[in-house]
Image (spheres, rainbow, N blue to C red):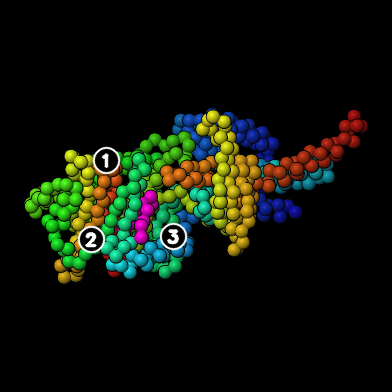
Amino acid sequence: MKKNSVNLFYTLIVLIVCSCQSEKQVNVYKVKKTDALLAKQNQKEKKTGLNWTAPNNWIEKKPTDFRLASYDIKTSNGDLVDLSITVFPGDAGGIESNVNRWRRQINLNPLNLNGIMNEALIESSMLGEYYVFDLVNQNNNQGMLATIIPNYNNSNSIKETIFVKMIGSLQVLEELKYEFELFCKSIHQLN
Amino acid sequence: MNKLIKRISDPKIFVFTIIWLMVLVFFGTIEQKDIGLFASQKKYFTSMILWVYGIPLPGGLLTMIILSMNLFSFFLKANSWRKNKVGILTVHIGALILLIGSGITSVFSIEGNMVIIENEKSDYMHSFYYKEFTVLNLDQHKDSIEVINFSENLLKQNQLLEYNTLPFKIEIIDFFLNSKLESRVNDTLSPLRGDAVKLELREKFPETEMNKNISGVTYKIISDDDKINGYYIYQLEQRRPEIITINNMDYALLLRPVRTYLPFEIELLDFDKVMHPGTQIAKSFSSKVFLNENQTSRRVLIEMNAPLRHKGYTLYQASYAELGDGREATVLAVVQNYGRLFPYISSIIMCIGVLLQMIIRIPGLLKK
């Protein structure tokens, strides 16, 4: 009886010591991919091999033949702003013609390439350097946030150009500017 | 050995430990107001040593261990096993079961909350207190995502996080229990990536309510790919994880409350709230849910005083949230307590013990 009790006593001490040990440090498991995630992955991969990460509150719209993807973004005052991603082969007409087309859309006068590049912001992502244009028309309170992302191939020539564009009032664009920048930075090549 | 047992089983130890536990409960309850429930529990009740102005005092855990040993050593004394001590023995067993139950509760119990949006489902809960640094291996497996969680204990300065399926290492630069984002001033870190380009994390004094703390981590990715290497930041409330691509594989990195998966799924059908007339103060709320398990569903109503108990889990209606897009979400508090029956069992045993002891003593008292 006494011997058993002593054994029990030691067992209790061992249990106490074991229970004081720290919890598991690295925990690994697998979860099933959701149908939505699988569909999204397949769709993007099929198109161009490009991928990106959009904030959860952006509502993805059905892609069209012209657009690779588009999103509806709800602003704090409840308005919906449209964001589009388009891809064209090569340099798609170049920076000057594209930016001037956008400038005309918000009633701004065209500029020469030097003038455009003076207003451009150069950022970099996993695809390399790209250009951000913050076009502002104070007269009609309209603006446009647009990026031109050249996607180079192995021989260092432009394989395709990715355009990301968002039009809205100046206040709305100011509110969404940071998310827009992060979104553009997240665009990357899968293959 | 006998000497040792005699010393450990000294009733004085029992009296002093009980008094000391009362002192801990008293000061722990008072300090809870300033430092919060979780911090107070950690400091007074689950600690081995309690430091007061540099003086080490026995913490709650150490006190309860001493108390358990004291109670247990009673059984090792030869003169304890007598007929006239059956009642005392039973009371000791009851008290010991209570302490074992509290030990099991503190080691194995988990609690957290489950947030479910109307018409959506969830099969996991988030911890109230603990965070984990998670890496999601998105592309390695066709139909599944590998989830690698590094516990909060590892989020210390200069700690290296690595796992055999990851082609990169993560070095923790800073981890703050409570943090705020500010425009970047510190330019000693290079290259900066993602949000870290413009923002930096600063430490904030922890809130008394743990769920109000917004933890943040600054980390460095070390890999063979220079495009990825650099310093990143992540704050708990950030809406999307940092995605990095190495060898055409996407990995998502984020900090989140520890996630525990349940063996069943809850689907929120409808959330109802009744407000006090003329006010915005909720009077009561309830959730109509489907309990989905093994391809069968059961309709259940979870109300404020009517929790759902299933497979050792208790799901209480705790709160609700209204989302920006007009949808409602229910917040259920989930508790899994393996030791919940111990207090009832031990109370019954102790009552029986007291009763037995009284019955044994009655003939003697009557003789007097």
> How many numbered markers are drawn?
3
User: Residue drawn at (11%, 48%), measured in percent from left and top?
Assistant: A109
Give the CA distance from mark 3 to mark 1. 40 Å
Name which residue type carries label 1: Gln
Mark 3 on the same chain as mark 2: no
Residue B111 % position (x, y): 55, 47
Residue assigned mark 1: A171
Identify the image quadrant of the C terminus of chain B: top right
Q: Residues within 10 Å of mark 2 (few under 14, many from 20)?
A: many
Q: Is residue A53 left or right of residue B41?
A: left
Mark 3 on the same chain as mark 1: no
Q: Nearer the viewer, mark 3 or mark 1?
A: 1
Is residue A53 part of the magenta span, yes or no? yes
Main SS of the magenta part reads loop
User: Residue drawn at (31%, 48%), measured in percent from left and top?
Assistant: A81
Q: Residues within 10 Å of mark 1 (few under 14, many from 20)?
A: few
Name which residue type carries label 3: Val
